[in-house]
Image: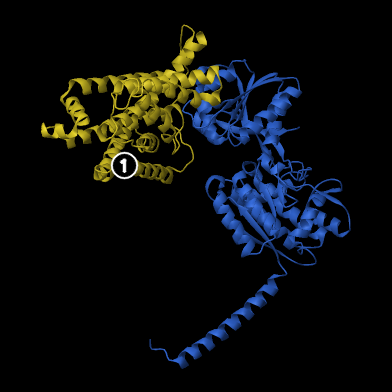
Chain colours: A yellow, B blue
Amino acid sequence: MQLFIQTVIDGISTGAIIALVAVGLSLVFRISRFVNVAHVDLATIGAYVTLLFASSLATPFPLAALIGIAAVAATGFGAYKLVYRRLRSERAITLIIASVGVSFFLRYLVTFIWSSNQQAFDLPLLRAYRFAGFRISPYDLMIILATLAVFAALHITLRYTAFGRSLRAVSDNPSLARVAGVASERVVSLMWLIGAGLAGLGGILLGIKAVLTPYLGWQLLLPAFAAVILGGVGSVTGTLAGALIIGIVGELAAIYWLPTYRVAAVFAMIVLVLLIRPQGLFGAKAVAK
Amino acid sequence: MGISRRDLLQRSAGLGALLATTAGGLRISVAQEAEEIRFGTLCPITRAGSIFGPGAQKAMEFAAADVNELGGLLGGRKIRLYSEDSQSDPDAGVRAAKKLIEVNQVQTVLGTWSSGVTMAVAPIVMESKVVNMNFSGTTDLRDMKKDEWIWPVAGSNLAYGEMMGTYAIQQGYKNASFMAFNNPSGLTLGEEFKRVFEAAGGTCNVIVYNPNQPSYRAELTKALSTNPEVIALGSYLPDTTIILKEWYALGEPTKWIGPIWAVSPALVDAVGAEAAEGIVSIGAVPNFDSPAYAAFKERYEKATGQPVLANPFSAMGYDMVVTCALAIEAAKSAVAEEFRKKIRAVASPPGKKVYTIKEALDAIRAGEEIDYEGVGGNMNFDETGEAKPYFGYWIAENGKLDFKGPVKG
């Protein structure tokens, strides 16, 4: 039982990072109706820009992280203005392929500037906190708390603010929203900024936990995409639930089955869930065109 | 067009004459160079292997210069080196090997590094009847039918697994875990470690994990679940970094052993002095017992400014050129098809142990059977055609990886 609960705790911290990266993917899908593959590479950019400021320019780490997030938000917004907005009347598949292109561009830009050798943030390693026989590392705790804060803020924003109402209106029925006087372009732009910024935050937290390579974010694409589908496409709460379930199931499979079957167990579970609820755990029906 | 027929005729005649002279010139130069023996080198000068390649190539140049200074081979023929860069990449390696073989018409392609490059170049050199010596460790090279064309000298994953197991046993450990990256390298290392460790009476729990994960905590929990005195690694740098960081956070005491490519100075930099303290690295080292080693060390370090221990491939590169040169003298032929059959004879027992090129050449010319002992290893090729290097160990202390001494098998 001890091992089981510990494994669940470990799974939550892995799931929290997946959730941070996945929620942007989900938001973009909700409003622009395509899977932005380059979203995970924005996470990589966030980690590397933070590294640049924290290590080379000796900025305090939290400030460097904020600069990193701002830079990623700008990059994501730039990609929207330069690429995706021009293609918005095309079919979803065109946009997905364009995003694969953006993804390659970002990844090789990182490789070109920083090389493919691994880098690491210069942060002290900390021992885990212990309570009642369980342990959790301070960084994992920070990741879980940051994720909870982000999701709480997102939930409140979407449900109780004018921006949230406009966003829901634009995503539910773009033409009706326009007719009703919603400044849809402004809403969509803001949403891209937020989504990309969250990817940056996810990348930075992952960089603290793991190591920085140009493939940092790319390795999260499948888990993040799976979390979006499992939770229900477009649902913020669903994405959080989906990501946490994926983190926990993967960790449990590695402990009680075989580490090499982590991914297989996760996907078997997703298939099972989708057989019963094709729209995902929290999803509404028919979101994709 | 304003060119009359007469113009055209004149120009053609001129061109013909020019071609004739050039062809004549070419023939003359080819005839002169036929006296030279053409060796190709294909080290990783750029990208992943660039910390090793330039040094290895430098050492090969030393060897060629040494042979030439002693008057060359086969009654005065000098060795001429043609060097290309594999870029640590199979695709670039294949292109460079083709250039060496087709344009420079070399008899050897020496110094391919990384198994990917060697496996890609292997069929080309065999088909072109050229000798390859390499710094690659995949067991595929052991198992393939290479008919004395391909010679690995830097130790296979089997050799690394064996030496890590031997070291662990010598430390008195009885209970180990092995964390293996799920690819042929990690699996072979793990199997061989377990075999050696259990043959000496220990128990070993092997955990295989998949690459590119944000966390290896479940794997680590499994590895620690048997309370091992030591965890050995068949891993690469990024996964090792993450595993060590997570282990440090857990605060569970255990020792660590890994191969030099994972447990490197870069790992110590990435995880910091405290988490790295005491971790042991096992890697190939030069032949400290060779009387020729001290001179090689001095010469190499002066030429490159790099400690010879940071690049065991340099000394092995020197041995590659020397071994081929001795085989040429013994075979009385500079054609790879002929001298490849003498490579094993001049480098492996039986025979009189020789340590320098002069000693070796004198003995061969006197008709003696020799066993060349290199500066990089003993160059004794086993039945599969592979030479096992010597091994040493490093321990991380105060944020630095310190060389401690040889591991004796």
Task: Give the residue pinned by disc 1.
Answer: A95
The location of residue A40, given as percent across then percent down, is: 37, 34
Location of the N terminus of chain B (image quadrant): bottom left
Relative horizontal placement of residue A288, taking residue B139 as reference (left or right):
left
Label 1 neighbour load within 10 Å: few <14, some 14-19, many 20+: many
Judging from the image, what secondary structure is the residue with disc 1 in?
helix
Relative horizontal placement of residue A22, taking residue A253 as reference (left or right):
left
The location of residue B165, given as percent across then percent down, is: 70, 28
The location of residue A51, given as percent across then percent down, is: 39, 35
Could you tell me the amino acid type at mark 1?
Answer: Leu
Q: Is residue B281 visible?
A: no
Between residue A76 and residue B378, name the one nearer to us. Answer: A76
Relative horizontal placement of residue A101, taking residue B11 as reference (left or right):
left
Between residue B207 and residue A227, name the one nearer to us. Answer: A227
- Residue that extends furthest to the right in the rendered view of this protein: B367
Q: Residue at x 46, y 19 (%)?
A: A249
Q: Is residue A10 visible?
A: yes
Q: Chain of mark 1?
A: A
- Residue that extends furthest to the bottom in the rendered view of this protein: B6
Q: Residue at x 38, y 25 (%)?
A: A227
- Residue that extends furthest to the front in the rendered view of this protein: A275
Q: Is residue A98 above or below residue B267?
A: below
Location of the C terminus of chain B (image quadrant): top right
Q: Is residue B144 above or below residue A239?
A: below
Relative horizontal placement of residue B365, taking residue A212 as reference (left or right):
right
Q: Is residue B119 above or below residue B171?
A: below
Between residue B175 and residue B12, name the one nearer to us. Answer: B12
Quadrant of the image occupied by residue A184: top left
